[in-house]
Image (spheres, rainbow, N blue to C red):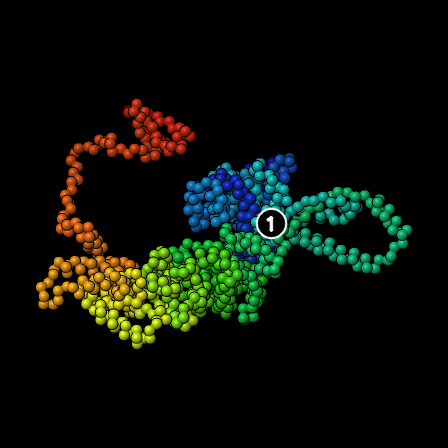
Amino acid sequence: EQVPLEAPSGVPKQKHDYQSDVARLRKIVINSLYSHRDVFLRELISNANDALEKLRLTALKDKTVWDGEETLNITIKSEKNENGKGGRIIIADTGIGMTAEELTNNLGTLAKSGTTEFLQRAESSDATGTGNLIGAFGLGFYSSFLVADRVYVSSIAPKTAKNPQPAQHVFSSSAEESSFEVYPDPRGNTLGNHGTEITLVLKDDALEYLDTHTLQELVNKHSVFSSTFPIYLFTTRTEEVPEEEEMVTPEEAGEATPSEKSDAEKAKLEDDEDEDEDEAVIEELSDEKVKEKEEEKKEVKMKPVTVDEWVHLNPMPPIWLRDPKNITEEEYDLFYQATFRDFTKPIAYHHFSGDSGSGVSFKAIVFIPGTLPDSFWQQPTSITVKDVRLMVKRVFITSDLGDDSLPKWASWVKVVIDADDLPLNVSRETLQGTSFLRQIRRIILRRLIQLMERLAKEEPAKFEELQKTFGSVIKLGAIEDQGNRDKLAVLARFPTNQRNSSSLDEYLDTRKKGQKHIFYLADVGKKISELQNSVFVEKLHARGYEVFLLNEPMDEVLFQNLRMWKKLGFQDVAKAGLKFGDEDLDPEEEKEQHKELTERFRPLLDWLKKEAGDVVSNVVISNRLVTSPCAIVADVMGYTANVEKLINAANKKAGRDFMHEYAKKQKLLEINPKSPLIEGLLKRIENLPAEGEEKDLEAEEELKEVASILIDGALVRSGFEVPDSNVFFTRVDRVLRRSLGVSETAQTDATVKPAPPVEAGVPTDEVDEAQQPDTPPLGDIHFDKDGKPRVVVPDELKDKISIDIEEMPDDDTTRHDEL
Ligand SMILES: Nc1ncnc2c1ncn2[C@@H]1O[C@H](COP(=O)(O)OP(=O)(O)OP(=O)(O)O)[C@@H](O)[C@H]1O
């Protein structure tokens, strides 16, 4: 059937080749997405919506583009071919339209970022994988080819200074060809001042889409939320009407456009009202008259007529204007997915109305998305706020409120906000200066935090989901957002030695009598189970104290920023000065006891101080150890293992500085006076010959070794690095020999056979049979005993594939690339 859109011969056509990425994308669409082909309608409606939005935005600056009166809508119509075979769907919008050049550029090239990556992934994955990708990517216009053999896009851009005489052009492309054509529309101007009409000539196996019920269902399912503009579907139904009346409303039989239609509807409505009035004055009819009338009626002949009607498919007001009580969770999810083009569901949402404080009332929905973009942590400096969609009286204004419209930690939040009374021509620039923007920022943050608080209280499962994705983000917020620090800190969760997750407030509930500190141990990157068994936690744990175990970079920084929580300071349990707060002895007695112990262990303390002088500034008696003999703790001014690691990493980039070297040494070696090992060591030190007597060099050397291992061991146990691990292991080796009674000086035979050098000039293609691996690598060619070549295939494929190998005569010089 001849489509009137086809250019008659003689009309100059511009033929173009598709850009290579487009060609690849079309191929994927056509070949592998058969089971997802419903998406074509959603994509085209969404493009139409974008075009209408663009028109409205352009008109804010240039009134000639759109006078504010002309209808803005999307229409869908299906047409069966007259010969009964096949048909087409026509999707039109009255949006911004395209010039001939734009038709060529917009539909013939791909400008989207990430396209190449998408193509690679799509081409390498199977069809099911690709299904997921569509959601993430959006195939846009090219999804037309899922259902159409040929697509015509007829379009006209509005009149502007640059384009004073717009003409309607057609873009035409078949699913098969790798080129497309652009030419003036042979029908002339059918689209009015601006707009686009897409005609899909359906494939034979896609004729189900001609059915208006199918189309209506698809729109209901995928697109009611994609457009704030009315979507109309052309339908035809049969009605019985009295024969004469048929003549009365001829428009009904014709194709009224939606706007004309609404006039017709209005007229009809007024008629109905008139009837009502008539009814009010109608006199009571006598039985006789009633009979008469009924007979009259019987004589009226009825006739079936087809009534064509544009059905409004999305008559509901936009979701944010509706009463939250009447909106289901599924509707919110669908709205979210359509609006933010995110195929995952949001974790939670908050729908509210309010007043900005400067008299602007608004309605808004705040969504917490299900995922955080990878770039959030990877490229923290390039984070922009792009999903706060500001509307004024339903009209989309901008989703670019400026980079600092929200703090970084909240830059991912997705919001629709519709203000009542802002001037319609607000733009991003004019917004910057208004107090409204600051107010929006405050309101969004407050509502977002309220939403998270609600999840914490009422929806533990969702809160856990939130923590998984946004746990570190919440901590970052508490660090960088002074104004919301305390509220966000309440929402932060950390593992402890007693439970997987605890908030600061929950921690306080388990606090012990007299406890004046919140205990924590931090070591970035360590496993929680390792932290749990740390020497620093052992006594606290044994005594039933709860200790936060921090292994994420943000954790310790947050504690240091908070400094206090509900009047309790934070105590790093790896630092000197650990107090439990329930010490049995009063401080004086405690001092006395400490003094006594120090005196008793004096010889060992002094001796160890000499031995460990490189690593620590002092050796002291510990009150924190239970079973471990000793530990290295950071002095009040010193670095904990965690901070040292962070600083070491930073120092590798920058030069070292004096403060760092100083702080690094500010460590104490604490010894456990109750440990038998320490007792034993003390005895051996005491037994060493006194000053002036003849020295026992061997015994001293032996003790030095033990001390060195003990100190290095304490470093490792406390999370620090050993200065030289080779020295450490050589010593361990020697001590092991001694305990086994092996000679300490006996040398291991260290002679090895040197690798022979290659003899110059001798080819090395000899293959040592014995060195051949049992199973040659897959895909390799090897030769049977009888000299036949074989390709190695995995066992499970042996009986599924067969590979023929063709032998080439030696003198054959042709290249066999396909091999
Ligand atoms: N109905 C339309 N009216 C005006 N321009 C359109 C229309 N449909 C498509 N376009 C133009 O063609 C371009 C390409 O469309 P396509 O659907 O391939 O990608 P997209 O809309 O940019 O991205 P996506 O659909 O994945 O969000 C659009 O960016 C737009 O400029």
Would residue 449 appear left or right of 194 to someone viewing this image? left
In the image, 546 versus 115, the foreground residue is: 546
Whole-percent x and y of residue 756?
16, 38
In the image, 538 versus 202, the foreground residue is: 538
User: Image quarter for residue 650?
Assistant: bottom left
Residue at image position (61%, 44%) is: 214
Would residue 238 appear left or right of 679 to someone viewing this image? right
Furthest toward the bottom, the residue is 588
Whole-percent x and y of residue 655?
25, 62
Residue at image position (40%, 68%) is: 512
Asked if one can make out residue 127 in the rendered structure from this viewpoint, the answer is yes
Q: Which residue is mark 1?
A: 220
Residue at image position (72%, 43%) is: 238
Quadrant position of the N terminus in the picture = top right
User: Image quarter for residue 24?
Assistant: top left
Q: Residues within 10 Å of mark 1 (few under 14, many from 20)?
A: few
In the image, 767 versus 191, the foreground residue is: 767
Quadrant position of the C terminus in the picture = top left
Of the residues shown, which amino acid type is indicated by label 1?
Asn
Would residue 509 appear left or right of 50 to someone viewing this image? left
Tell me the element at label 1. Answer: helix
Whole-percent x and y of residue 725?
22, 55
Furthest toward the right, the residue is 288
Whole-percent x and y of residue 636?
29, 69
Up/down of 488 relative to 197, above or below: below
Residue at image position (34%, 56%) is: 530
